[in-house]
Image (spheres, helix red, strand yellow):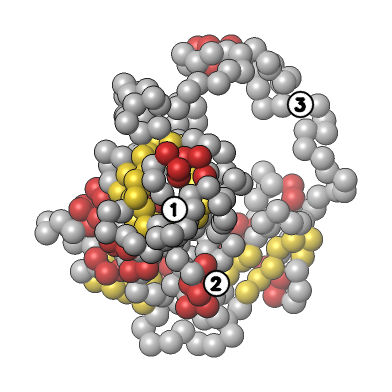
Amino acid sequence: MVVYNANPAVIAPDQTRVLAGLAREDLFTVVHEQLLTDTARYADLLLPATTHFEQTDLYSSYWHLYLNLAEPAIPALGEAKPNVELFALLAQRLGFEDACFQDGVEALISQALDNPANACLDGITLEQLKAGGPVRLNVEEPHPAFADGHFPTPSGKIELYSERMARAGHDPLPTHAPLTEGGDGEQPPAGPYPLIFITPPNHFFLNSTYANMPSNIRSEERPRLEIHPEDARSRGILDGDAVQVFNARGQVQLEASLTDTVRPGVVVSRGLWWGRQSPGGHGVNATTPQRLADMGGGATFFSNLVEVERSEDDQSASGRCAGDGAS
């Protein structure tokens, strides 16, 4: 297995099984990385990757209307290589003779820009980007979504009744389907895991990126669980208590933060902490399911039911009141 641009030991669902898979004796793991991530610790072979200071790259539009070219500020250090060079060298050593494996990063950028199917790129060239400064995409303003009145549906209209959903076995009208736990939905929400567990980003991490930086760790302080005072009171949990969030897949240890900014029945933990900063070595994805969404086949990180209990050996919040609602 080759891992690059990812940290599956932290970001993938059902973390307990992921870590067990990474630890298999019969699995040879190659990780191409800049940092000693949790995934890199499982590597049989760890290859150094360049940073954005050491490589040419195309910065594409990310909710704005400009392209920009990044060129190396310093030569690549040591044996560090960018993705393009790594995979080209690997392909050549494996005997692939396809012309694409001879292309450097500038050739690939030129090919990406020469895309007749994307009118936004008309006339934009690598030479124009190399001349310096961002280049605006060919987008007229204002450009509101669906301004032409056409929608990506079979009828081209907004479909309040969807024949396509009906054919897929879903309710063709907008409806709410209660969340169920378990891969085949056999367990109702009223079962042993009554709380919905949400894990959005915090202010200082981006998924697991930047979660290793000491300044960001100091700002976030520690992995916390935001829980409504009513849910905390019924479980004997005080503000600042160490708690376990768990279901049949696994458990994560967090510090309780009582707040009425979350609804009763919902608990929240922000950000993806690396295992070395998480008590017990597990993060929130130890509880998240592998199952795919019923529509679209996407991940279901936020369709996750859990229970929360106070850690029996925790004495950190003695004397504090569960009804304070202090965050």
**Is residue 267 or residue 159 the one in the foreground?**
267
Kindly report the distance in space between the C-alpha atoms of the residues bearing marks 3 and 2. Answer: 46 Å
**Is residue 163 or residue 20 the one in the foreground?**
20
Contact flag, marks 1 and 3 (Cβ < 8 Å)? no
- Could you say which quadrant of the image residue 222 lies in? bottom left
Q: Residues within 10 Å of mark 3 (few under 14, many from 20)?
A: few
Q: Is residue 113 left or right of residue 168?
A: right
Please report whichever mark, 1 or 2, sits nearer to the chain's N-terminal start. 2
Q: Is residue 24 left or right of residue 227?
A: left
Task: Assign a secondary structure to mark 3.
Answer: loop
Could you tell me the amino acid type at mark 2? Ser
- Could you say which quadrant of the image residue 315 lies in? bottom left
Q: Which label was assigned to residue 219?
A: 2
Task: Assign a secondary structure to mark 1.
Answer: loop
Which residue is located at x 42 percent, y 39 percent?
234
Which residue is located at x 65 percent, y 51 percent?
115
User: Split into 4 quadrants, where in the image is the N terminus?
Assistant: bottom left
Contact flag, marks 3 and 2 (Cβ < 8 Å)? no
Q: Which label was assigned to residue 24?
A: none
Q: Which label was assigned to residue 238?
A: 1
Please report whichever mark, 3 or 2, sits nearer to the chain's N-terminal start. 3
Q: Is residue 139 left or right of residue 263?
A: right
Could you tell me the amino acid type at mark 1? Leu
Q: Mark 1 against mark 3, which lies toward the viewer? A: 1
Query: Residue 298, can we see it?
Result: no
**Is residue 224 or residue 12 the one in the foreground?**
224
Residue tagged 3: 150
Which residue is located at x 41 percent, y 49 percent?
237
Which residue is located at x 82 percent, y 40 percent?
144
Could you tell me the amino acid type at mark 3? His
User: Split into 4 quadrants, where in the image is the C terminus?
Assistant: bottom right
Task: Assign a secondary structure to mark 2.
Answer: helix
